[in-house]
Image: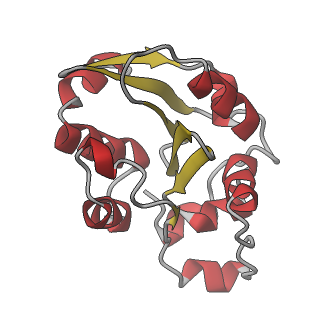
Amino acid sequence: MTSSSDRSSRNTDTDDDTVTGNAFGVMQEGDSWQITRLTDAALTSLDDAARQVRSLRTEGASFGLVDVDHEFFVILRPGPSGMRLMLSDATASLDYDLAADVLEELNVDVPDMSDEELEDTDPWGEGDMSILEDLGLPPGVLEIIVSETDLYADEQLQSVAERMGFGEVLERHLPDS
């Protein structure tokens, strides 16, 4: 969740090296889903997250889900033309290097906002909203999930997983589940 009141008090990977969250590789094998945990380096490095997602071995589709500090998430999906990306909150790029790196890779400028402007601005997603369309998640549904700013990023990802049919599998990999 990236509410205005949370933004001014959150830890950043530039001010505090303690970035928490979860990073997963998701693989589809026929009608079943498998999830593997990615290393914590995926929480702070787009290059590392992309390398880990590319290394997933599966006959079916694969992609990465990265939840950083429960503030924002990134979906990464390797494809023939390169890594496809979707960032749930472009304003997170003001505080998190990973989000800024995603915007840079997407050729989108980091928002130029004062703290006051940021407090009055709702977060917005950037990138490929059709990233999971061929796997059953229409872009409009992903846009709705991203716009649910009353949910934390891990809750948004759980919603993605439930709509795609691997909610229970993801839940088993989350801490305290």
- Is residue 5 positioned above or below 164 on the image? below
- Is residue 63 positioned above or below 99 on the image? above
Residue 45 placement (x, y as % from top left)? 74, 36
Quarter location, residue 112? bottom right
Q: Considering depth in this image, is 15 or 127 the residue closer to the camera?
A: 127
In-image side of 63 versus 15 (left or right): left
Residue in the image at 78% along x and 41% along y: 16
Residue in the image at 39% along x and 17% along y: 59
- Is residue 56 positioned above or below 130 on the image? above
Q: Is residue 23 visible?
A: yes
In-image side of 61 versus 122 (left or right): left
Quadrant in which the N terminus appears:
bottom left
Quadrant in which the C terminus appears:
top left
Q: Is residue 45 visible?
A: no
Residue in the image at 65% along x and 31% along y: 49
Quarter location, residue 173? top left
Quarter location, residue 138? bottom left
Q: Considering depth in this image, is 49 or 77 the residue closer to the camera?
A: 77
Total numbered labels: 0
Residue 105 placement (x, y as % from top left)? 73, 55
In-image side of 138 versus 20 (left or right): left
Q: How is the image coloured?
A: secondary structure
Residue 148 placement (x, y as % from top left)? 31, 64
Instruction: Specify the farthest residue to the front.
Output: 80
- Is residue 161 positioned above or below 38 on the image? below
Residue in the image at 51% along x and 71% along y: 4
Q: Considering depth in this image, is 149 or 101 the residue closer to the camera?
A: 101
Instruction: Specify the farthest residue to the right.
Output: 14
Residue 159 placement (x, y as % from top left)? 25, 46
